[in-house]
Image (spheres, rainbow, N blue to C red):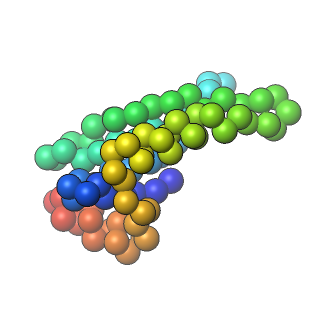
């Protein structure tokens, strides 16, 4: 979904994981040394009528604020940040 840097310069990503027949997950992982570490995973509830409560996404937003996440990186900045980890 998006990549961003913390004030410390650590690269993090917010992403969704979906499996057929299972509730989706919205997760945040941050790069530490040469590995990605999941820092948050929240179930993404879905209603049968297409309605999905926003509460899980509000939790993710609150978490991102609490860890000092910067603005989402554009595609070029993300590519540059990832290249620095090789």
In this figure, what is the number of numbered marks? 0
Measuring 14% from the left and 46% from the top, which residue is drawn there? Answer: 33
Question: Which x, y percent locates residue 86?
Answer: 16, 60
Q: On the rendered structure, is 50 left or right of 61?
A: right
Which residue reaches farthest right? 49
Q: Is residue 34 above or below residue 83?
A: above
Q: Nearer the viewer, residue 69 or 41?
A: 69
- Residue name at image x 33 percent, y 45 percent: 67
Can residue 19 be spotted in the picture?
A: no
Residue 30 vertical placement versus 75 (above, below): above
Q: Residue at x 50, y 45 (%)?
A: 61
- Say left or right for 42 vs 64: right
Could you say where residue 81 lies in the image, as x and y percent from the top left?
Answer: 26, 65
Left or right: 6 with respect to 13? left
The image quadrant of residue 84 is: bottom left
Residue 11's x, y, as percent?
28, 55
Left or right placement of residue 35 versus residue 21 in this view: left
**Residue at (46% x, 56% y) in the render:** 2
């Amino acid at each position: 979904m998006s990549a961003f840097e913390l004030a410390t310069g650590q690269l993090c990503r917010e992403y969704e994981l979906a499996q057929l027949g299972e509730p989706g997950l919205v997760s945040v992982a941050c790069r530490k040394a040469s590995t990605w570490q999941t820092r948050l995973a929240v179930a993404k509830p879905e209603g049968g009528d297409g309605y999905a409560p926003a509460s899980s996404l509000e939790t993710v937003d609150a978490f991102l604020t609490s860890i000092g996440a910067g603005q989402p990186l554009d595609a070029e900045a993300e590519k540059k940040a990832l290249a620095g980890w090789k």
